[in-house]
Image (tube, grey):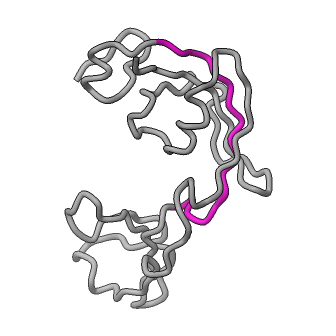
């Protein structure tokens, strides 16, 4: 039977810097095996029981992958649509292909725009401290929709 798993997490890099945490919020709920969380994290927590606390280290290759140098490039400012506020942090896709990476502007120097299509956590080892808060059979609706619905159901 497909499970819905709820967990609290604190995510840190190798230097111990907290990158994200669910503490102070509702636990994260996900449908096991649905691809909504990193597959290696899913595999590591899917066998845990409610109340289990575990540290899980994912090397970059099992998290968001290694940095792909081909996704780092310089383009000309004129390649952006007129009126676009091109500044660091701007995110965009270069085409409408579903598998096309999301690029972000890293820096702008005059007419040169430095962009990066790597995930912001590419090349970073991820260290999760997790606490399992819920584990239950998924409902037929959750299975059909491919994600957990949480407390009170979910409407599409």
Q: Position of residue 114 (x, y in %)?
A: 46, 81
Is 121 included in the stretch rendered in magenta?
Answer: yes
Q: Position of residue 1 (x, y in %)?
A: 40, 17
Q: Nearer the viewer, residue 155 or 35?
A: 35
Residue drawn at point x = 42 percent, y = 89 percent: 112
Q: Nearer the viewer, residue 82 or 62?
A: 62
- Asked which quadrant contains residue 48, the reply is top right
Q: Nearer the viewer, residue 88 or 126?
A: 126
Residue drawn at point x = 75 percent, y = 51 percent: 17
Looking at the image, which residue sits at the far left? 96
Is 143 included in the stretch rendered in magenta?
Answer: no
> Is residue 71 left or right of 51 when viewed as pictured?
left
Considering the image in quadrants, where does the C terminus appear? top left
* Start-end of magenta stretch: 120-136
- Asked which quadrant contains residue 45, the reply is top right
Residue drawn at point x = 45 percent, y = 20 percent: 3
> Is residue 10 left or right of 148 when viewed as pictured?
right
Looking at the image, which residue sits at the far top? 152
Q: Position of residue 68 (x, y in %)?
A: 49, 75
> Is residue 156 left or right of 150 when viewed as pictured?
left
Q: Is residue 127 above or below residue 96?
A: above
Q: Is residue 127 above or below residue 7?
A: below
Q: Position of residue 12 (x, y in %)?
A: 71, 48
């Amino acid at each position: 039977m497909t499970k819905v798993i709820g967990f609290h997490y604190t995510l840190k890099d190798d230097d111990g810097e907290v990158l994200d945490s669910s503490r102070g919020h509702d636990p994260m709920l996900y449908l096991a095996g649905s691809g909504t969380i990193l597959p290696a994290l899913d595999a590591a927590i899917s066998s845990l029981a409610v109340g289990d606390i575990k540290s899980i280290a994912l090397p970059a290759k099992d998290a968001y992958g290694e940095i792909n140098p081909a996704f780092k490039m310089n383009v000309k400012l004129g390649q952006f649509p007129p009126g676009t506020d091109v500044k660091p942090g701007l995110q965009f896709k270069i085409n409408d292909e579903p598998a096309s990476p999301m690029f972000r502007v890293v820096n702008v120097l005059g007419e040169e725009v430095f962009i990066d299509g790597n995930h912001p956590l590419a090349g970073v080892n991820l260290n999760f401290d997790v606490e399992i808060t819920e584990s239950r059979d998924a409902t037929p609706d959750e299975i059909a929709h491919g994600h957990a619905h949480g407390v009170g159901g979910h409407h599409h």
